[in-house]
Image: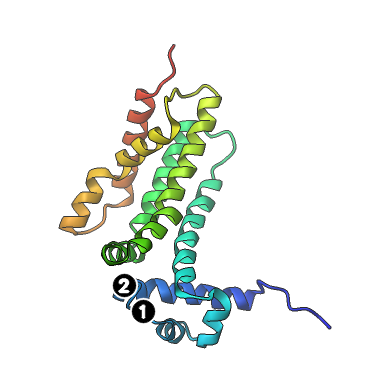
Amino acid sequence: MTLRSPGRPKDLEKREAILDAAQALFAERGVDGVPIEAIAARSGVSKVTVYGHFGDKATIFDSIVQRETERLKQSLCQAPSGSGLEDTLTRFGMALIDMLTQPCHLALDRAVSLEAQRNPDIGRRFFEAGPGQVRTMLTQLLSQAQEKGVIALDDPECAAEDLLALWLGFHAIERRFCGGTLPDDQTISRHVIRAVRLFLKANAPDA
């Protein structure tokens, strides 16, 4: 008897279709407003298939956020070896903002923000799987740079939060309340580079 190996291309395609459908529906209706039947119908699979891949809606939600975080990690891993800290942080910031400004992510973020007011567990799960993981990744990166002596930090985690605030601060507030078109790549690049240089200047090791 030949055992069926998990993760075959067809299975992966179905899994991605389910996640894509769920992400779109969550953005449209909120997490609590989307039944499993709707996810199955949108993704073109049976309800049994959805349950077979994920078990429940909470697992689907977590998998969506983890997928976006993994995409960020993959984009960061594309950095060439030997890149300096400024280049590495710039690439991190560009990848992060690119992910956060995708229309599907903006819609999901709004839906989760509203949902979290009624169900704080949804908000906590989203934070831990998404923003919390990003903070951890950046903290690890800064800790490694500190060990090499290229940056001086009192607390790498606080420093990571400082840099995230420089990247995302006021522009995120403006978009939340005013909407409008998203900045182009050149504008984002200038903003990220300026933030990185300010951060590195403030945390330069003593001469």
Vertical order, 146 against 28 (above or below): above
* C-beta proximity under 8 Å, tags 1 and 2: yes
Question: At 42% from the left edge and 25% from the top edge, which residue is drawn?
Answer: 154
* Residue 185 image offset from top left, x and y in percent: 33, 50
- Colouring mode (rainbow / by chain / secondary structure / one colour): rainbow
Which image quarter holds the N terminus? bottom right
Q: Residues within 10 Å of mark 1 (few under 14, many from 20)?
A: some
Question: At 59% from the left edge and 37% from the top edge, which residue is drawn?
Answer: 81
Q: Amino acid at mark 1?
A: Val
Residue 193 seen in render: no
* Residue 107 image offset from top left, x and y in percent: 30, 66
**Disc 1 to disc 2, C-alpha distance:** 7 Å
Question: At 30% from the left edge and 76% from the top edge, which residue is drawn?
Answer: 29
Pick the front one: 86 or 26: 26
Q: Amino acid at mark 2?
A: Gly
Pick the front one: 53 or 207: 53
Residue at numbered disc 1: 34
Q: Describe the element under mark 2 as helix, strand or loop.
A: loop
* Residue 83 image offset from top left, x and y in percent: 53, 34
Question: At 36% from the left edge and 55% from the top edge, which residue is drawn?
Answer: 100
Residue 30 disc label: 2
